[in-house]
Image (cartoon, rainbow, N blue to C red):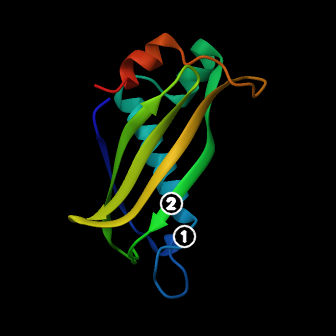
Amino acid sequence: MEEFKYKIKVFYEDTDAGGVVYYANYLKFFERARTEAITEIGLSNRKLLDKFGVLIIVKSCNIDYKKPAKLEDQLEIKSIISSISNSSFKMKQNVFRDDELLTSSEIHLVVVDKNGKPTRIPDELKQKIIIN
């Protein structure tokens, strides 16, 4: 998977009393971008569950808030796989306003079975997300 780009507008509900994006909402932005990235490669969270019996969950995340996003900003989230193993992968996700980097993150994602136990990444998914 090459870098995936996802655009989002900051709504009132995304902000705190000062009109700045509330820090926890970046996690929602990242989740939306990851979900759309999976759709872009012809899969979905529902397909992964129904076809392979797996889910992708967040194991950990490291977020660096550099500059605030504000009400009605047009943002772009750029996501790319930075490493992959048998049952997990890491994704770098960065938020930009125009060319200005606002927030950077590294999210560690794990593929789990229906019981929540780590399991191998299905071949179809791995082939589509493998780093080129």
Amino acid beneath label 2: Ile
The image shows residue 52 at horizontal and vertical percentages of 60, 14
Left or right for 106, reference 119? left
Q: Is residue 23 above or below residue 59?
A: below
| SS of the residue under disc 1 | loop
Say which quarter of the image contains residue 66. Answer: bottom left
In the image, residue 33 lies at what x, y percent?
Answer: 42, 46
Q: Amino acid at mark 1?
A: Tyr
Name the residue that disc number 2 marks: 63
User: Image point 46% across, 83% down: which residue?
Assistant: 19
Provide the residue designation for mark 1.
Answer: 23
User: Horizontal and vertical percent for residue 38?
Assistant: 43, 31
Looking at the image, is mark 2 or mark 1 nearer the viewer?
2
**Badges 2 and 1: C-beta atoms under 8 Å apart?**
yes
Q: Nearer the viewer, residue 109 or 72?
A: 109
List the single residue furthest toward the right.
Answer: 115
Q: Relative to the observer, which residue lies in front, 131 or 53?
A: 131
